[in-house]
Amino acid sequence: MKKLIASLVLAAGFFAFGGTPTFTSPAHAVDFSGKTIQAIVAFREGGGGTFYTRLYLPFFKKYLPGSPKIIVRNMPGGAGIKGSNWFQANATPDGLYYSVVSTSNMTSFVTGGKKVKYNLLKWNYIMLEPLGTVFYTTPSTGVTGKNIKKDVEILRKTKIVAGAKSPTSSELHSFLVFDLLGINNVTPVFGISSGKQRKAILRGEFNFKRDSVLNYLKKVTKYAKKGRVVPFMTLGYDKGGKIVRDPAFPNLPTVVDAYKAVHGKEPSGIAFKTYLHYFNMSVMASKGFALPEGTPKSIVDTYITAAKKIEHDKGFAKKAGKLFGVYPKSYGEDAKNVMRNAVDLSPEARAHVKKFIKNKFNMNI
């Protein structure tokens, strides 16, 4: 288990000023010699986005032509809105700026309203890296993690107390899952960071939490072994257009498994279609890197080539551990399609989210 934790901590991601790179035509290679590149992180120092960016930084320096200097620039605020807005407005399309993307700035893009000035659908994606999600509760609920149908039926009868940063933060994904599964007796407590939520469930103040596979393995597994928390479900993983069990937790059922166990049929309808967008935000597009709108194809391709070289770098693989690659990455246009699946909601799905937030949290977006 220690190797598993170390592998995912590095692989999944815990998760800069100069002139213009010299390139004249597609026939001439992009060259960043003597340049300084800024890696924009719209989150706080010490967080997952910063760690993820710093993990890749020396390898981008190694494989980008000209071995440029790369500086990490943190711009936290508004669940990724402040830094993402800055990137949209100020990052020049010359290869001297790239941004980390994460579930948080995707969720904010969808539900942030007028504060959001950035457009994730227009950014140029270098790569996106999936990461699974684990749901867990306390033994006091009666959930055992052994029979998903019984566990959902128990949760339907239990008063669920769960923390969240805000009604539109990434925890919204959990509340959409509750709604999909008919778990309606839920009391949210807002203004609580993820780390504080984790402490609260261990103190018995909350009885539900979800974590990325990364955080679960690093910070929660030891408590599960002691019986203080019970993992019972994951979001799963998209394999060829079908949601299958998470490769890091193959013994845990998915949300789709839970729905089928309770309802006896495949999920469908606008609630499920909306959920799929949030599934893609949380899992398939969990973290990655993007260049600003308008970046020439030659520069985008140069970054993608560097990213693919990193994937095969033995030094990076050593840092990432044995499970590096457990969630295969997407690159370029494939990554952009993954992002579309995540944040390009239909008018019906947007209306569903808006109505859901109003009904559940009495908040207009």
Image (tube, grey):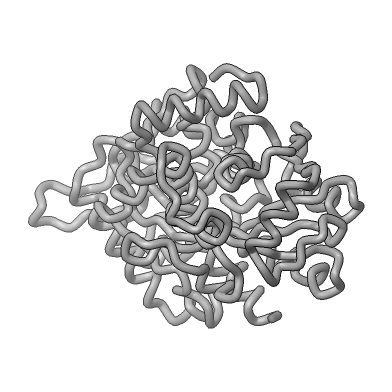
Q: Say if 64 sits above or below 44 in the image.
A: below
Decide: is 235 above or below 297: below
Horizontal side of residue 96 vs 352, given as left or right: left
* Residue 343 seen anywhere in this rendered image of the structure: yes
Q: Residue at x 83, y 46 (%)?
A: 206
Q: Nearer the viewer, residue 190 or 84?
A: 190
In front: 117, or 283?
Answer: 283
Q: Between residue 259 and residue 295, name the one nearer to us.
A: 259
Instruction: Give the quarter of the figure containing the N terminus.
Output: bottom right
Q: Position of residue 155 (x, y in %)?
A: 73, 51
Q: Residue at x 52, y 26 (%)?
A: 112
In the picture as drawn, the residue positioned furthest to the front comes out as: 264
Residue 53 appears in view: no
- The image shows residue 116 at horizontal and vertical percentages of 47, 24
Residue extending farthest right: 203
Q: Quadrant of the C terminus?
A: top right
Q: Measured from the top left, where is residue 135 in percent x and y?
A: 66, 57
Image-based side of 94 in relation to 116, left or right: left
- Residue 237 position, x and y percent, is 46, 63
Q: Residue at x 48, y 33 (%)?
A: 84
Quarter of the image where one finds residue 142: bottom right
